[in-house]
Image: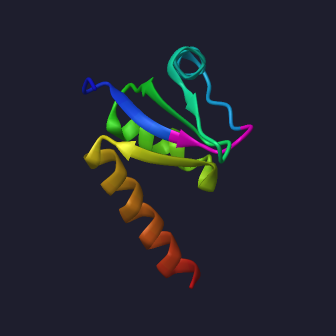
Amino acid sequence: MHRDEAVVRLAPGTRLTGPAVRAVDANGLTGDDGWTVATVPIESVEHAHDEFLRLGTAIEVLEPPELRARITATVTALARTYA
């Protein structure tokens, strides 16, 4: 995986935008559960964080670790706010 890529897991029916659509179509592997794992291009960890958060639970970031950690921190903070 390159620094400008992320490995994601997408819920059935979830569509990304831009170059990520082509990447999912080209290398996405759909499991028996209907979720698709794919390597997608990202502009930066910061940009991907914002873009992927809008998808809520329809996406799981598997790599890179720094993006996963940043999303985890944001979701944890949101959970504290809304608890």
Residue 2 versus residue 11 in the image, above or below: above
Query: Nearest the camera: 12 or 46?
Result: 12
Residue 70: x and y, percent?
34, 54
Picture quadrant where residue 62 is located = top left
Give the side of residue 23 with respect to residue 61, left or right. Answer: right
Residue 80 versus residue 39 in the image, above or below: below
Give the side of residue 44 with respect to residue 17, left or right. Answer: left
Picture quadrant where residue 41 is located = top left
Part of the protein shown in magenta: 9-13
As drawn, the residue found furthest toward the front would be 32
Picture quadrant where residue 82 is located = bottom right
Residue 66: x and y, percent?
26, 47
Q: How is the image coloured?
A: rainbow
As drawn, the residue found furthest toward the right would be 13
Query: Nearest the camera: 34 or 49?
Result: 34
Residue at image coords 56%, 23%: 24
Residue 51 versus residue 20 in the image, above or below: below
Give the side of residue 31 with respect to residue 14, left or right. Answer: left
Residue at image coords 44%, 46%: 61
Image quadrant for the C terminus? bottom right
